[in-house]
Image (spheres, grey):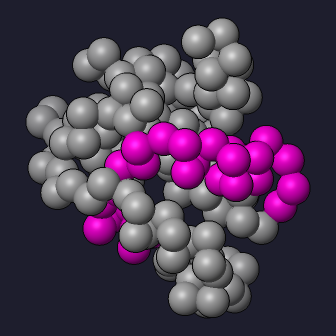
Amino acid sequence: MRAVFDTNVIVTGIVAQGLCREIVETHLPQHAAILSERLWSELVDKLREKFHLDPDELPLLSLYRQHATWVEPTPLEPPTCRDPDDDWVLATALAGKAQVVVSGDADLLTLHSFRGILILSPRGFLEHLSAG
């Protein structure tokens, strides 16, 4: 499945136990992860600034970066989300022809879908996989 994993899912999967860790360790490698420079930069900044982690010292993050399908999204017209950063998640999903966006962000989750792309919480993503 072609999927965009929002920064909050990846960060939580790295720094805490739980559903996001399961997604990052088990399910991320099984799917075609789509990534853009904008999302990668946000991820690196969060890990450094908020958690004082060096992304270069996280082997899982290196694998994510190497195996992701990289795209160059264009800005959404008109803007869709209350938070402009969330538009870049959706734009990345469109550019990468994603089937799903996995996010813990309420601003994205309230959309449920965007132009045919499912927007699921981490739990919803796991349930979707189980039902599939």
Task: Give the farthest residue toward the front.
Answer: 30
19 within the magenta span: yes
Q: Is residue 106 above or below residue 7?
A: above
Q: Is residue 34 left or right of residue 24?
A: left
The answer, for residue 42, to whether it is visible in the render is: yes
Q: Of helix, strand and loop, which mostly describes the magenta segment?
A: helix
Indicate the position of residue 118 as horizontal and vertical percent values: 44, 21
83 within the magenta span: no
| Corner quadrant of residue 39 | bottom left
Q: Is residue 6 above or below residue 132?
A: below
Residue at the spot 30% in from the left edge and 16% down from the top edge: 116
Q: Which residues are magenta?
A: 16-43
Q: Nearer the viewer, residue 94 or 22?
A: 22
Q: Is residue 13 above or below residue 55?
A: above
| Corner quadrant of residue 126 | top right
Indicate the position of residue 35 as horizontal and vertical percent values: 35, 56
Q: Nearer the viewer, residue 74 or 97?
A: 97
Residue at the spot 27% in from the left edge and 59% down from the top edge: 70
Q: Nearer the viewer, residue 111 or 71?
A: 71
| Corner quadrant of residue 46 | bottom right
Count of numbered circles in the view:
0
Q: Quadrant of the C terminus?
A: top right
Task: Give the farthest residue toward the top.
Answer: 131
Q: Quadrant of the N terminus?
A: top left
Residue at the spot 51% in from the left edge and 69% down from the top edge: 63
The answer, for residue 48, to whether it is visible in the render is: no
Indicate the position of residue 112 as horizontal and vertical percent values: 48, 18
Residue at the spot 62% in from the left edge and 17% down from the top edge: 128
Indicate the position of residue 38 as horizontal and vertical percent values: 31, 65
